[in-house]
Image (cartoon, rainbow, N blue to C red):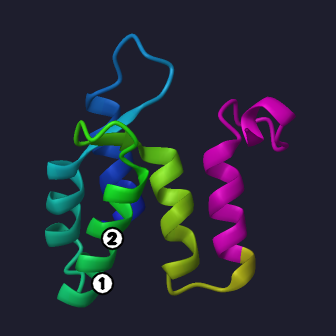
Amino acid sequence: MSLRASLTLAASKHEGSTPKVKCLRKDLESAIKACNIEENDAEIFGKMFTLFDKTGGGKVDYRELLCGFSPLVNETLHDRLLLAFELVDEQGKGFVTKIEMR
């Protein structure tokens, strides 16, 4: 399973009444282990999680986190950009509104 798929699955379990789907730090740690991510990369992902955790509560919007990870993914530039836009396109319409970009 990919890191994206693991985080998406974990975030869907936390989808409550808030409009943003959350990813907990423990979800990231589990996904990193499941995907056999190297220790150096795991450390970078952990630091990025801290940067995205604006409140210090141990949870972040998983879409924002994955967008942040997208430049680090070992894919072509096209695939990394596609990943970022798919995550922002919350309604799956194939385009991104100004509100979604914010």
Query: Is residue 91 located in the magenta-colored stretch of the structure?
Result: yes
Q: Quadrant of the C terminus?
A: top right
Between 83 and 43, the one nearer to me in the picture: 43
In this image, 88 relative to 15: left or right?
Answer: right
Instruction: Please report contact status of discs 1 and 2: CB closer than 8 Å, yes or no.
Output: yes
Q: Residue 98 lies in what quarter of the image? A: top right
Depicted 89 relative to depicted 49: above or below:
above
Between 47 and 26, the one nearer to me in the picture: 47
Q: Residue at x 82, y 41 (%)?
A: 96
Between 49 and 62, the one nearer to me in the picture: 49
Q: Residue at x 31, y 57 (%)?
A: 50
The residue type indicated by label 1 comes to Asp
The secondary structure type at the circle numbered 2 is helix
Q: Residue at x 14, y 59 (%)?
A: 30
Residue linked to disc 1: 41
Residue linked to disc 2: 45
Depicted 54 relative to depicted 32: above or below:
above
Query: Is residue 21 located in the magenta-colored stretch of the structure?
Result: no
